[in-house]
Image (cartoon, rainbow, N blue to C red):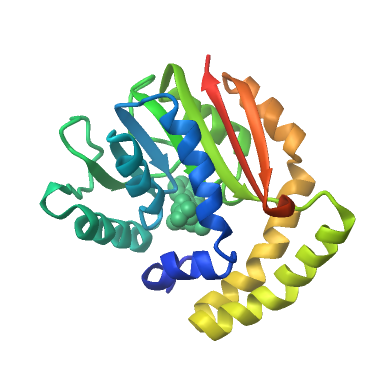
Amino acid sequence: MFRGLPARYDRLAEWLSFWQNRRWRAALLDAISAADPRLVADVATGTAGVALALHARTGAAVVGFDLDEAMARQGMRNVRTALGRRAVATGAPPSARRRSVAIAVARAEQLPLADHSVDALSFTYLLRYVDDPEATLAELARVVRPGGVVATLEFAVPEDPLWRALWWLYTRAALPLGGLVTGGRPWYRVGRFLGPSITRHYRRYPVDWTLEAWERAGIGEVSVRRMSLGGGIVMWGRRK
Ligand SMILES: C[S@@+](CC[C@H](N)C(=O)[O-])C[C@H]1O[C@@H](n2cnc3c(N)ncnc32)[C@H](O)[C@@H]1O
Protein backbone atom coordinates (compact mmCIF):
# COMPACT_ATOMS: atom_id res chain seq x y z
CA MET A 1 0.00 0.00 0.00
CA PHE A 2 2.73 2.47 0.96
CA ARG A 3 5.14 1.49 -1.80
CA GLY A 4 6.14 4.52 -3.86
CA LEU A 5 4.74 7.02 -1.36
CA PRO A 6 7.53 8.03 1.05
CA ALA A 7 9.35 10.57 -1.15
CA ARG A 8 6.29 12.75 -1.71
CA TYR A 9 4.31 11.78 1.37
CA ASP A 10 4.78 14.94 3.43
CA ARG A 11 3.85 17.30 0.62
CA LEU A 12 0.91 15.34 -0.75
CA ALA A 13 -0.58 14.57 2.68
CA GLU A 14 -1.02 18.34 3.02
CA TRP A 15 -2.16 19.13 -0.53
CA LEU A 16 -4.70 16.34 -0.74
CA SER A 17 -6.18 17.22 2.66
CA PHE A 18 -6.30 20.93 1.72
CA TRP A 19 -3.76 21.55 4.50
CA GLN A 20 -6.14 20.16 7.14
CA ASN A 21 -3.66 17.45 8.17
CA ARG A 22 -1.47 20.10 9.80
CA ARG A 23 -4.44 21.47 11.78
CA TRP A 24 -5.29 17.99 13.08
CA ARG A 25 -1.64 17.46 13.98
CA ALA A 26 -1.60 20.77 15.86
CA ALA A 27 -4.59 19.63 17.95
CA LEU A 28 -2.82 16.33 18.68
CA LEU A 29 0.34 18.21 19.69
CA ASP A 30 -1.71 20.40 22.06
CA ALA A 31 -3.06 17.28 23.80
CA ILE A 32 0.35 15.62 24.18
CA SER A 33 2.28 18.73 25.18
CA ALA A 34 -0.18 19.46 28.01
CA ALA A 35 1.29 16.41 29.78
CA ASP A 36 4.84 17.83 29.57
CA PRO A 37 6.30 14.42 28.59
CA ARG A 38 9.98 13.47 28.60
CA LEU A 39 9.65 10.30 26.49
CA VAL A 40 7.00 9.88 23.79
CA ALA A 41 6.24 6.97 21.45
CA ASP A 42 4.80 7.86 18.04
CA VAL A 43 3.25 4.77 16.46
CA ALA A 44 2.71 4.44 12.70
CA THR A 45 5.17 7.30 12.49
CA GLY A 46 5.63 7.00 8.71
CA THR A 47 7.94 9.76 7.54
CA ALA A 48 8.33 11.02 11.12
CA GLY A 49 6.37 14.26 10.67
CA VAL A 50 4.48 13.82 13.94
CA ALA A 51 7.58 12.55 15.79
CA LEU A 52 9.60 15.60 14.75
CA ALA A 53 6.77 18.00 15.56
CA LEU A 54 6.37 16.40 19.00
CA HIS A 55 10.07 16.76 19.69
CA ALA A 56 10.11 20.39 18.53
CA ARG A 57 7.06 21.27 20.58
CA THR A 58 7.81 19.45 23.85
CA GLY A 59 11.58 18.90 23.86
CA ALA A 60 10.83 15.28 24.71
CA ALA A 61 12.79 12.35 23.32
CA VAL A 62 10.57 10.66 20.75
CA VAL A 63 10.75 7.17 19.34
CA GLY A 64 8.75 6.51 16.19
CA PHE A 65 7.64 3.03 15.14
CA ASP A 66 6.44 1.96 11.72
CA LEU A 67 6.06 -1.46 10.16
CA ASP A 68 6.86 -0.30 6.62
CA GLU A 69 10.60 -0.19 6.05
CA ALA A 70 10.47 2.32 3.19
CA MET A 71 8.36 4.76 5.22
CA ALA A 72 10.63 4.28 8.23
CA ARG A 73 13.74 4.88 6.11
CA GLN A 74 12.23 8.14 4.82
CA GLY A 75 11.42 8.97 8.45
CA MET A 76 15.06 8.41 9.40
CA ARG A 77 16.20 10.65 6.52
CA ASN A 78 13.77 13.36 7.61
CA VAL A 79 15.00 13.13 11.19
CA ARG A 80 18.60 13.45 10.05
CA THR A 81 17.75 16.44 7.87
CA ALA A 82 15.76 18.14 10.59
CA LEU A 83 18.03 17.45 13.54
CA GLY A 84 21.42 16.97 11.92
CA ARG A 85 23.98 15.43 14.21
CA ARG A 86 21.59 15.24 17.13
CA ALA A 87 19.54 12.66 15.27
CA VAL A 88 19.86 9.00 16.04
CA ALA A 89 18.34 6.66 13.52
CA THR A 90 18.50 3.06 14.52
CA GLY A 91 16.79 -0.25 13.94
CA ALA A 92 16.44 -0.79 17.67
CA PRO A 93 14.17 1.12 20.03
CA PRO A 94 15.93 3.74 22.12
CA SER A 95 15.76 3.68 25.87
CA ALA A 96 18.04 6.61 26.61
CA ARG A 97 16.55 10.05 26.92
CA ARG A 98 19.63 11.81 25.57
CA ARG A 99 18.59 10.58 22.12
CA SER A 100 16.25 13.09 20.60
CA VAL A 101 14.25 11.35 17.85
CA ALA A 102 14.75 7.74 16.80
CA ILE A 103 12.85 5.63 14.30
CA ALA A 104 12.46 1.87 14.50
CA VAL A 105 10.68 -0.72 12.40
CA ALA A 106 8.02 -2.36 14.56
CA ARG A 107 4.33 -3.26 14.51
CA ALA A 108 1.80 -1.40 16.61
CA GLU A 109 0.43 -4.80 17.62
CA GLN A 110 3.70 -5.74 19.32
CA LEU A 111 5.71 -2.74 20.46
CA PRO A 112 9.28 -3.40 21.61
CA LEU A 113 8.75 -1.36 24.78
CA ALA A 114 8.33 -2.34 28.42
CA ASP A 115 5.04 -1.83 30.24
CA HIS A 116 4.42 1.78 31.35
CA SER A 117 7.73 2.93 29.84
CA VAL A 118 6.66 6.14 28.05
CA ASP A 119 5.03 9.34 29.32
CA ALA A 120 2.84 9.79 26.23
CA LEU A 121 1.94 8.00 23.02
CA SER A 122 0.57 9.25 19.73
CA PHE A 123 -0.75 7.23 16.81
CA THR A 124 -1.97 8.72 13.57
CA TYR A 125 -3.89 7.08 10.72
CA LEU A 126 -3.31 3.64 12.22
CA LEU A 127 -6.46 1.81 13.27
CA ARG A 128 -7.85 1.41 9.74
CA TYR A 129 -4.82 -0.73 8.92
CA VAL A 130 -4.86 -3.21 11.78
CA ASP A 131 -6.83 -6.47 11.90
CA ASP A 132 -7.91 -6.06 15.51
CA PRO A 133 -8.24 -2.41 16.64
CA GLU A 134 -9.29 -3.44 20.15
CA ALA A 135 -6.19 -5.60 20.74
CA THR A 136 -3.99 -2.92 19.17
CA LEU A 137 -5.39 -0.26 21.51
CA ALA A 138 -4.64 -2.51 24.48
CA GLU A 139 -1.06 -2.91 23.25
CA LEU A 140 -0.65 0.87 22.78
CA ALA A 141 -2.03 1.54 26.27
CA ARG A 142 0.25 -1.12 27.80
CA VAL A 143 3.41 0.94 27.23
CA VAL A 144 2.09 4.24 28.66
CA ARG A 145 2.65 5.04 32.33
CA PRO A 146 -0.41 5.66 34.52
CA GLY A 147 -1.38 9.32 34.15
CA GLY A 148 0.33 9.53 30.75
CA VAL A 149 -1.46 10.85 27.68
CA VAL A 150 -2.56 8.92 24.59
CA ALA A 151 -3.63 10.92 21.52
CA THR A 152 -4.61 10.08 17.98
CA LEU A 153 -5.83 11.61 14.75
CA GLU A 154 -7.69 9.94 11.93
CA PHE A 155 -9.87 10.74 8.97
CA ALA A 156 -13.59 10.67 9.71
CA VAL A 157 -16.92 10.65 7.90
CA PRO A 158 -18.78 13.98 8.35
CA GLU A 159 -22.03 13.64 10.33
CA ASP A 160 -23.91 16.40 8.51
CA PRO A 161 -25.65 14.92 5.41
CA LEU A 162 -24.63 17.78 3.10
CA TRP A 163 -20.96 17.67 4.11
CA ARG A 164 -21.08 13.87 4.03
CA ALA A 165 -22.30 13.98 0.39
CA LEU A 166 -19.56 16.44 -0.57
CA TRP A 167 -16.98 14.37 1.32
CA TRP A 168 -18.16 11.28 -0.56
CA LEU A 169 -17.76 13.05 -3.91
CA TYR A 170 -14.33 14.32 -2.93
CA THR A 171 -13.01 10.97 -1.71
CA ARG A 172 -14.51 8.90 -4.55
CA ALA A 173 -13.79 11.19 -7.51
CA ALA A 174 -11.49 14.14 -6.77
CA LEU A 175 -9.04 12.34 -4.50
CA PRO A 176 -8.06 9.57 -6.95
CA LEU A 177 -7.75 12.12 -9.74
CA GLY A 178 -5.83 14.59 -7.55
CA GLY A 179 -3.57 11.75 -6.42
CA LEU A 180 -2.85 10.75 -10.01
CA VAL A 181 -2.08 14.30 -11.13
CA THR A 182 0.15 15.16 -8.17
CA GLY A 183 1.81 11.83 -7.40
CA GLY A 184 1.28 9.41 -10.29
CA ARG A 185 0.03 5.82 -10.02
CA PRO A 186 1.01 5.13 -6.39
CA TRP A 187 -1.03 8.13 -5.27
CA TYR A 188 -3.91 7.22 -7.57
CA ARG A 189 -4.04 3.87 -5.75
CA VAL A 190 -4.06 5.68 -2.39
CA GLY A 191 -6.75 8.07 -3.63
CA ARG A 192 -8.97 5.14 -4.65
CA PHE A 193 -8.29 3.24 -1.46
CA LEU A 194 -8.84 5.96 1.14
CA GLY A 195 -12.55 6.81 0.85
CA PRO A 196 -13.83 3.21 0.94
CA SER A 197 -11.32 2.36 3.68
CA ILE A 198 -12.61 5.20 5.89
CA THR A 199 -16.26 4.31 5.24
CA ARG A 200 -15.66 0.61 5.95
CA HIS A 201 -13.77 1.34 9.15
CA TYR A 202 -16.50 3.50 10.69
CA ARG A 203 -19.26 1.08 9.63
CA ARG A 204 -17.49 -1.60 11.61
CA TYR A 205 -16.04 0.57 14.36
CA PRO A 206 -18.15 3.73 14.89
CA VAL A 207 -16.69 6.55 16.97
CA ASP A 208 -18.81 5.47 19.98
CA TRP A 209 -17.37 1.97 19.74
CA THR A 210 -13.87 3.47 19.66
CA LEU A 211 -14.55 5.55 22.78
CA GLU A 212 -15.65 2.42 24.64
CA ALA A 213 -12.62 0.52 23.33
CA TRP A 214 -10.32 3.22 24.70
CA GLU A 215 -11.96 2.81 28.11
CA ARG A 216 -11.61 -0.98 27.95
CA ALA A 217 -7.92 -0.53 27.04
CA GLY A 218 -7.43 1.48 30.23
CA ILE A 219 -7.52 5.00 28.78
CA GLY A 220 -9.97 7.33 30.55
CA GLU A 221 -10.99 11.01 30.49
CA VAL A 222 -11.29 10.67 26.71
CA SER A 223 -11.97 13.84 24.70
CA VAL A 224 -13.01 13.98 21.07
CA ARG A 225 -12.61 16.88 18.68
CA ARG A 226 -14.19 16.65 15.24
CA MET A 227 -12.50 19.04 12.83
CA SER A 228 -12.72 20.33 9.25
CA LEU A 229 -16.51 19.85 8.96
CA GLY A 230 -16.14 16.32 10.31
CA GLY A 231 -13.46 15.12 7.88
CA GLY A 232 -10.90 14.69 10.67
CA ILE A 233 -11.08 13.53 14.24
CA VAL A 234 -8.62 13.99 17.10
CA MET A 235 -9.00 11.99 20.32
CA TRP A 236 -6.97 12.01 23.50
CA GLY A 237 -7.18 10.57 26.98
CA ARG A 238 -5.24 9.65 30.09
CA ARG A 239 -3.83 6.23 30.94
CA LYS A 240 -5.52 4.93 34.09
C1 LIG B 1 -1.00 7.28 6.33
S1 LIG B 1 0.56 6.84 7.01
C2 LIG B 1 0.67 8.02 8.33
C3 LIG B 1 2.08 8.36 8.70
C4 LIG B 1 2.21 9.35 9.85
N1 LIG B 1 1.52 8.87 11.03
C5 LIG B 1 1.69 10.71 9.48
O1 LIG B 1 0.65 11.13 9.99
O2 LIG B 1 2.32 11.37 8.66
C6 LIG B 1 0.14 5.38 7.89
C7 LIG B 1 1.38 4.68 8.42
O3 LIG B 1 0.94 3.61 9.26
C8 LIG B 1 1.86 2.56 9.12
N2 LIG B 1 1.23 1.34 9.64
C9 LIG B 1 0.16 0.70 9.14
N3 LIG B 1 -0.12 -0.38 9.89
C10 LIG B 1 0.79 -0.40 10.91
C11 LIG B 1 1.02 -1.27 12.01
N4 LIG B 1 0.24 -2.32 12.22
N5 LIG B 1 2.04 -1.00 12.82
C12 LIG B 1 2.86 0.06 12.61
N6 LIG B 1 2.69 0.92 11.58
C13 LIG B 1 1.66 0.70 10.74
C14 LIG B 1 2.14 2.55 7.63
O4 LIG B 1 3.31 1.83 7.32
C15 LIG B 1 2.23 4.04 7.33
O5 LIG B 1 3.54 4.52 7.41
* Residue 103 in sight from this viewpoint: yes
Residue at (50% x, 30% y) in the render: 150
Residue 188 position within the rendered picture, expressed as x and y whole percent measured from the top left: 58, 78
Considering every residue shown, the one lying at the far left of the view is 85
Q: Nearer the viewer, residue 90 or 42?
A: 42
- Residue 183 falls left or right of residue 72: right
Q: Quadrant of residue 207?
A: top right
- Residue 95 falls left or right of residue 111: left
Residue 138 position within the rendered picture, expressed as x and y whole percent measured from the top left: 54, 27
Q: Nearer the viewer, residue 28 or 96?
A: 28
- Residue 87 falls left or right of residue 18: left
- Residue 133 falls left or right of residue 68: right
Residue at (37% x, 24% y) in the render: 119
Say above or below: 209 vs 186. above
Residue 202 position within the rendered picture, expressed as x and y whole percent measured from the top left: 74, 47
Residue 211 position within the rendered picture, expressed as x and y whole percent measured from the top left: 69, 29
Q: Quadrant of residue 111?
A: top left
* Residue 67 in sight from this viewpoint: no
Residue at (14% x, 47% y) in the render: 86
Residue at (47% x, 25% y) in the render: 149
